[in-house]
Amino acid sequence: MDLLDFEAQGLYFDEPETTGVPELIQEAAEKYASGDAELPLLQAYFKAPQSLNVLVALNRFYYYQHRLNDALEATQKALAVIRALIDFPEDWREVQLSHLQAAPVERLTQVRLYLFTLKAIGFIKMRLGELNESQAIFEKLVSLDSKDRIGAQALLDLLKNQHSE
């Protein structure tokens, strides 16, 4: 399955948002340099805990603050939200190529987002030193993405090279 061979539909950032959430995300962006961005992001999260806009903003904030455990938590919550949209198994280890192939065309954007979010989890786990889990995630992604559109092969190769040294 070519994960680029479709027309993007239903992009998460185009979805309607809970009242006040876009303003809180904007406020956080404006306060990032001063170090005061976390409060508006958490306020946005309490208003809209299922919002991918909020979860992605939290992920980015925590990642760039080098708070990797917090970034991981936000990313795992985003994966759960996306998983529910596309009706994938709760455990990513159970996702098979047949799940991707059975996804309706109008959900392929969310399928790609799921795979990229899983890759982000693998990357954060790699940064946290959880190399076995990270490798398992990258191996799963490579098995689902024969054309490496998600770009997990290079990360898998990097991990394998580190293990062999």
Image: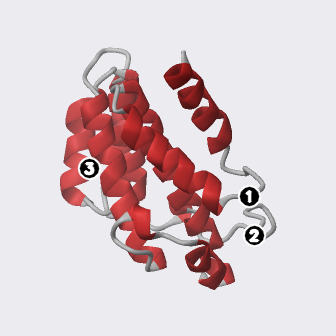
Which of label 3 and label 2 is nearer to you? 2
Q: Which residue is mark 3?
A: 44
Q: Do callouts 2 and 1 mark residues in contact (Cβ within 8 Å)?
A: yes
Which element is circle 2 on?
loop
Quadrant of image for the N terminus: bottom right
Q: Amino acid at mark 1?
A: Ser
Q: Position of residue 133 (x, y in %)?
A: 38, 42
Q: Nearer the viewer, residue 127 or 20?
A: 127
In front: mark 3 or mark 1? 1
- Label 3–label 2 contact, CB within 8 A: no
Dot label at residue 146: 1
Q: Earlier in the sequence, mark 3 or mark 2?
A: 2
Q: Residue at x 59, y 70 (%)?
A: 10
User: CB of mark 3 within 8 Å of CB of mark 1?
Assistant: no
Residue holding disc 2: 1
Q: Position of residue 108 (x, y in %)?
A: 64, 72
Q: CA distance from mark 3 to mark 1?
A: 38 Å
Quarter of the image that includes the C terminus:
top right
Amino acid marked by disc 3: Ala
